[in-house]
Amino acid sequence: MPPRSDPPHPLSRTVDGAGQRVSALLAAAQRHLRVAPVAESGDAVTRSHLDDGRCVGWYAPPVPGWRVAIDAERADAAPPVALAGRFGSTDFWGRWTRVECLAKLADVPVATWWHRHGLEVPPGTAWLWRTMPLADLVVTVAFTPTDRVGRQSVGRELRGFPDVAVSGPG
């Protein structure tokens, strides 16, 4: 049986209802994700490449004024020893995929993010995200408005869906 899905949490005060569209996409995120070989995922809006040759693609319609990023990792993979030692192994892949997405949306190298924030989401962030299991993977999908006004609005609202605990060994 698949894991329980988190209830949607609508974003109420963004321009032209785009926040509600993003919230709806996140609530239905598993329907918009596909795992396939790289050669079969070229039409995805965005992709995450796995170490075993598969690719996770996001196939939802774009939301004008918003950027999207995804990241996926194998749930059963052990966290790298050095990173687990530095950041802890509890829900490592959930925190890792979330930070990878947020760093992509912030146009910041992930190593720079680690130095600033570790594997945490800083307060006042302007992102909406959802982290969930998908088959044998942990996947995060995250959105941010493309303009500053939208980011400020989101920063005052809900930033993430309650994530499903998705820890691997460690």
Image (cartoon, rainbow, N blue to C red):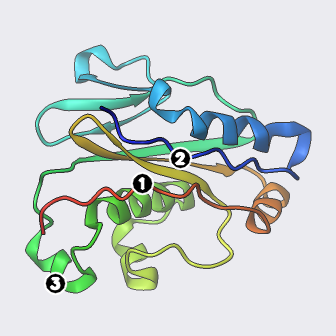
Q: Is residue 134 positioned above or below 90 on the image?
A: above
Query: How far is mark 1 from mark 2, CA to CA?
Result: 7 Å
What quarter of the picture does the N terminus occupy?
A: top left
* Foreground pick, 63 / 39: 63
Looking at the image, tell me whether mark 3 or mark 2 is earlier in sequence order. Answer: 2
Circle 1 — which element? loop
- In the image, which disc is placed on residue 164? 1
Q: Residue at x 45, y 76 (%)?
A: 120
Q: Are marks 3 and 1 in contact (CB under 8 Å)?
A: no
Q: Is residue 2 left or right of residue 13?
A: left
Q: Picture coordinates of residue 104 (x, y %)?
A: 47, 55
Label 2 packing within 10 angstroms: few (<14), some (14-19), many (20+): some
Q: Is residue 87 positioned above or below 33 on the image?
A: below
Q: Residue at x 40, y 75 (%)?
A: 112
Circle 2 — which element? loop
Label 3 packing within 10 angstroms: few (<14), some (14-19), many (20+): few
Q: Is residue 93 positioned above or below 80 on the image?
A: above
Q: Picture coordinates of residue 8 (x, y %)?
A: 65, 44
Q: Is residue 138 positioned above or below 118 on the image?
A: above
- In the image, which disc is placed on residue 6? 2
Amino acid type at image mark 2: Asp
Amino acid type at image mark 1: Val
Looking at the image, tell me whether mark 1 or mark 2 is earlier in sequence order. Answer: 2
Q: Is residue 128 left or right of residue 157?
A: left
Q: Residue at x 29, y 66 (%)?
A: 91
Label 1 packing within 10 angstroms: few (<14), some (14-19), many (20+): some
Q: Are marks 1 and 2 in contact (CB under 8 Å)?
A: yes
Looking at the image, tell me whether mark 3 or mark 1 is earlier in sequence order. Answer: 3
Give the number of callouts: 3
What residue would you read off at disc 3? 85
Amino acid type at image mark 3: Gly
